[in-house]
Amino acid sequence: MKKVWLAAVISSVLLSPASFANNGDKIVVAHRGASGYLPEHTLPAKALAYAMKPDYIEQDVVMTKDDQLVVLHDHYLDRVTDVAEVFPNRARKDGRYYAIDFTLAEIKQLSVTEGFNLKDGKQVQGFPERYPMWQSNFTVPTLQEEIEMIQGLNKTLGYDIGIYPEIKAPWFHRHEGKDISKAVLEVLKEYGYTSKDSKVYVQTFDFNELKRIHDELLPAMKIDLKLVQLMAYTDWNETMVYDKDGKAQPYSYDWMFKTDGMKTVAKYADGIGPWKPMVVSDQSSKGNIKLTGLVKAAHAQGMAVHPYTFRKDEGRIPAYAEDFADMLDIFYNTANVDGVFTDFPNLAVDFISERE
Ligand code: G3P
Ligand code: CA
C-alpha cells in the first residue's frame, strides 16, 4: 500500500531481487490499537487506531475458563483491570489473576484502565504521560467483537484494514487443557480469513506451535494464512516447555540467531517479528548505525520483517536516534524492515505518507 522511496526500492530490487519480501510496501501495525492514546486493546483504542489508517491492527488473544477468546495482552487480568477489587479471592498462589480462571461473563464485569504496576501496594501507571488511569469506562472485548468492528468499519469507511492476532502463550493454554490456536483459527475462518491473500497475519512466540499451525491445523481446516514467528531471548521466559516432571523450562531461542536460523523459520513462517535491538544493535550511535544482519537473513529467505515496539514515550527512543521519526527512518530505510508495530500508528502512517 505504501510505496516508500521508490527510487531506492527500485534500485535495491534491481541489485538484489530477493531483498524485499513484499515488493517494497512498508506497513504500519497498530500495536494493541492506538495504545499510546487510549487503554490498550479496548475497542475505543482500536477504533481510534482504525481512523489513523494503519495497514493492520493487532490483537493479543487469550482464552477464558469457558473457552471464549478475549483480547488482552497478558494471560493475567491484573495489570489492566479492577479484577483484584471485583473478585478479591480469585488470585492463584503467585498472586496473579489468570484470565483462564474466569468466565467471559465475569470478565465482562471488569473495568479496563491504562496499564499499571503495583509498588508498595499502590498502582503506578506504566506510562505516566499516557491516558489517565481509571478515566471513563472500558471493557475487555472478545476477538469476535473486535473483528466485527474492524470489518464493519471496512464497510462504512471503505478501507481494507487487516488484523494481526497473536496467539498468546499457547504452551500455557495447552497445559491448562485448552487449544487456543485451533480456536483462534476457527474464528478467523468463520470471519472469512482463509488464504494468504487475506488481510491477516497470525503471530506467535511459540515456534513449536507455529510448526503445528503450519503442518497440522491449517491443512486440517483447509485454509492457509500468513504466519509470523515472534522472536524473544531465551532468558525472557516468553515461551516455556514442560519437562517430564511437569516443570516449565524456558524454550531456547538461541538457534534462531545462528546461521541457518532464518532458513528453519522460513519453512513455516512468512515473516518474523523481532525485538528492535535484534535488528539495530544497541551498540549503534548517532551517525553510526550497526545492523545485526537479521533483516538480510530473513529477506534472503523471502520473509517479511516487522519489529516491535515503536514508542515515543520518555526513555523509549534509543540513544542512536534523534527522535521518533529518526528512529522510524533508521528502521524503515537503513535497516529496510517491512513494517513496524507501534503504539503511535498515526506517527508511522504520517512518516510513510510524507515520504511517498
Ligand atoms: O506481537 C508483537 C509484539 O506485540 C510483541 O510484543 O509483548 O507487546 O505482545 P508484545
Ligand atoms: Ca503482541
Image: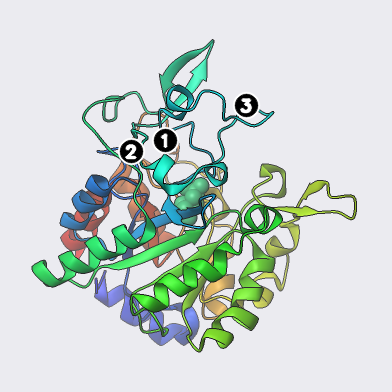
- Above or below residue 130? Residue 215 is below
Residue 257 horizontal/vertical position (percent): 69, 61
Tag 2 residue: 312
Q: Nearer the viewer, mark 1 or mark 3?
A: 3
Asked which secondary structure carries label 2, the reply is loop
Query: Can residue 289 be seen by looking at this rendering?
Result: no
| Outermost residue to the right | 245
Distance from Cα at disc 3 to Cα at disc 2: 32 Å
Residues tagged 2 and 1 counted as in contact (Cβ below 8 A): yes
Distance from Cα at disc 1 to Cα at disc 3: 29 Å
Q: Please name the residue shown 40% across and 67% down the image.
A: 338
Question: Quadrant location of the C terminus?
Answer: bottom left
Asked which secondary structure carries label 1, the reply is loop
Residue type highlighted by circle 3: Gly
Q: Nearer the viewer, residue 137 or 28?
A: 137
Number of numbered discs visible in the structure rendering: 3
- Above or below residue 79? Residue 294 is below
- Above or below residue 354? Residue 33 is above
Tag 3 residue: 95
| Outermost residue to the top | 120
Q: Please name the residue shown 56% across and 67% down the image.
A: 181
Residue type highlighted by circle 1: Arg
Judge the density around disc 1: few (<14), some (14-19), many (≥20) Cα neighbours within 10 Å.
Answer: few
Tag 1 residue: 316
Asked which secondary structure carries label 3, the reply is loop
Residue 49 horizontal/vertical position (percent): 23, 52
Question: Quadrant location of the N terminus?
Answer: bottom left
Labels 3 and 2: the sequence-earlier one:
3
- In the picture, residue 158 is in which quadrant? bottom left
Judge the density around disc 2: few (<14), some (14-19), many (≥20) Cα neighbours within 10 Å.
Answer: some
Residue 224 horizontal/vertical position (percent): 48, 84
Q: Is residue 158 left or right of residue 329?
A: left
